[in-house]
Image (spheres, rainbow, N blue to C red):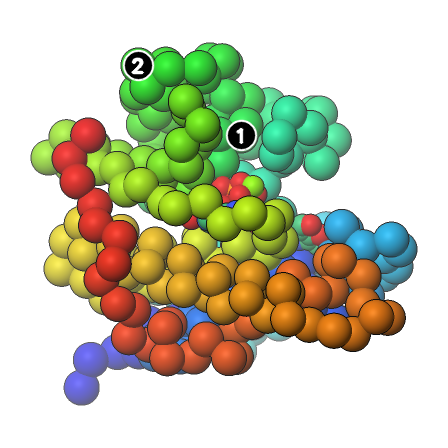
Amino acid sequence: SEKTPRILSIQSHVVSGYVGNKSATFPLQLLGFEVDAINSVQLSNHTNYKVFKGQVLNDKDLEDLVDGLAQNNLDNYTHLLTGYVVCDPVMGDNGRMYVPEPLKEIYKTEIVPLADILTPNQFELELLSGIKISTMSDLQTAVKELHKAGPETVAISSTEIDDKLIAIFSAIKNNALIKIDIPKIPSNFTGSGDLFAALFLAHMYLQDNMKDAIEKTVNSLHSVLLKTYEYSQVCKDEDSQPARKIELRLIQSKSCIENPEAHLLAEPF
Ligand code: ATP
Ligand code: PLP
Ligand code: MG
Ligand code: MG
């Protein structure tokens, strides 16, 4: 029988809600992956709430965990997924960095070159490429710069050019550049970027080609966000903060993750 893919996922943990490993683990397991999670931080809840409290895993703690895995020969992974560290270079959004500035150079010179698949948002793409993006042509130039640094596949989960929401996927192999238009839902989600990276990793492995991987990823994600948005509109709990009402409805979206419908279609760009 074929070997089960086994992912080491190094991301945030939140006790309540869904970002980081909480947003990636369940969908990956549903799609048939073994997921071993290392929690890079453990917080009460994500950082868009009024208050958040918790602990950060330091380098010694991380080394200990990896050492334990290695001594038991458990460090035989097929994939590595990281948020606050490879693949998804979480640095900021909407013009604001949420990690310390020196991390930008470390990402550029040490981490990005190690990634096969990179999933920056538009702001992170600007930081990593040094190119300010206002047109599609800027975007293409910036993506080429990132390929030069190493990653075979670059997925920009969302760009807002001319007020339209588009996801862009680029593969060095066969020079493919693919886009997919995404209808904008009038809300701000948290954990959606992390879910995007997890689903894209899964479908790049499960599907035969990048077009299918993109369509499955974006359609699953969009269904989860729609379900989440609908719930936020009907949720009557007066004690809930806005951040609480818009927590991803992952478990309720089980079937959209297992069998995404093909509403949104990818096209050459
Ligand atoms: P990061 O995780 O660093 O914030 P990002 O900014 O790309 O990356 P999101 O803004 O959460 O992450 O977007 C991830 C995906 O979620 C996008 O591809 C898009 O499909 C979807 N998405 C997020 N917000 C919306 C929205 N308001 N309407 C429709 N789709 C959305
Ligand atoms: N991890 C933590 C602890 C966060 O607070 C956030 C955002 O607030 C994220 C990760 C990233 O979430 P997203 O997937 O929306 O980028
Ligand atoms: Mg974002
Ligand atoms: Mg993210």
On screen, residue 53 above or below 99: below
Q: Is residue 135 at all visible to an observer of this figure? A: yes
On screen, residue 36 above or below 62: below
Residue 241 is left or right of residue 166, and the answer is right
| Farthest bottom residue in view | 1
Can you give x and y, in whole percent of width and height, for residue 208 in the image? 13, 60
Amino acid type of disc 1? Glu
Residue 164 is left or right of residue 123, and the answer is left
Kindly identify which numbered label has been placed on residue 209. none
Can you give x and y, in whole percent of width and height, for residue 123 in the image? 54, 27
Rounded to the nearest whole Å, what is the CA distance between mark 1 and mark 2? 17 Å
Q: Residues within 10 Å of mark 1 (few under 14, many from 20)?
A: many
Residue that badge 1 annotates: 124
Q: Secondary structure at mark 1?
A: helix
Q: Earlier in the sequence, mark 1 or mark 2?
A: 1
Could you say which is closer to the camera, residue 254 or residue 199? 254
- Residue drawn at the location 71% of the way across and 36% of the way down: 98
Residue that badge 2 annotates: 137
Can you give x and y, in whole percent of width and height, for residue 234 in the image? 64, 71
- Residue drawn at the location 64% of the way across and 65% of the way down: 232
- Ligand 3 resides in the quarter of the picture at top right
Amino acid type of disc 2? Ser
